[in-house]
Amino acid sequence: MSRLRLAAIGLTLLVAACAGPGGPGGGSSSPSSDPTRPDTTVPGALATLNGLSAGEIERRFGPPSFRHTDPPAEVWQYRTRVCTLDLFLYRQLGVRLTVSHAAVRSSGGPTVSESDCLRAVQAGR
């Protein structure tokens, strides 16, 4: 597994643990009852974000609710009442910051689809 992928997985786990509901000690680990597990009922919705620049993301969703820099990555988080969108951005060729991974989590309620979360984040802009 590449270092980039391991770093993205590690950052995902770190952000999920610090984000509130569903963090450490946050209940069952069953996929159907764990609100922190990404929903895969609408596959591919998040894939449309891969490769977008930081500027394109900000034009689409506005500034993130949370931003953390941990070279070589930046983690951007968009929080709404229904979900949290986590974006992992890396510098391409050392210059352009682009999305390399995205994840969706419910905000403590019922599981939310990727596309519904993206719509909620865009509406909250």
Image: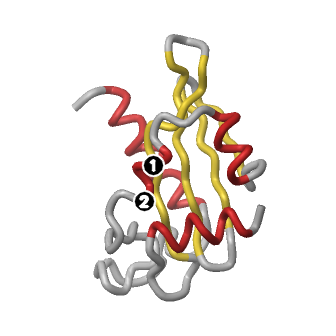
Give residue 70's position: percent from left, percent from top: 59, 31
Q: Residue at x 72, y 44 (%)?
A: 58
Residue at (60, 20) in percent of width and height: 96
Badge 2 crowding class, 10 Å Cα cut-off, few under 14, some 14 to 19, many 20 or more, is: some
Q: Quadrant of the C terminus?
A: bottom right
Q: Secondary structure at mark 1?
A: helix
Query: For residue 48, which numbered disc appears in the image?
Result: 1
- Seen from the viewer's position, the closer of residues 111 and 73 is 111
Residue drawn at (53%, 74%), measured in percent from left and top? 116
Q: Is residue 47 above or below residue 55?
A: below
> Dot 1 surroundings within 10 Å: few (below 14), some, or many (20 or more)?
few
Q: Does residue 50 appear left or right of residue 54 in this picture?
A: left
Instruction: Name the secondary structure under disc 2.
Output: loop
Question: Relative to residue 119, is residue 46 drawn left or right?
Answer: left
In the foreground, 108 or 93: 93
Q: Position of residue 3 (x, y in %)?
A: 33, 26
Rendered view: 53 above or below 102: above
Can you tell which quarter of the image residue 57 is in? top right
Which labelled disc corresponds to residue 45? 2
Tell me what residue is drawn at x 50 percent, y 19 percent: 92
Locate residue 95, reporting x and y percent: 60, 14
Q: Looking at the image, which is closer to me, 31 or 26?
A: 31
Residue 114 position, x and y percent, is: 45, 67
User: How many angstroms separate mark 1 from mark 2 (CA)?
Assistant: 6 Å
Circles 1 and 2, Cβ within 8 Å, touching? The answer is yes
Kind of residue indicated by mark 1: Thr
In the picture, measured across the screen, residue 28 lies left or right of residue 75, that is left
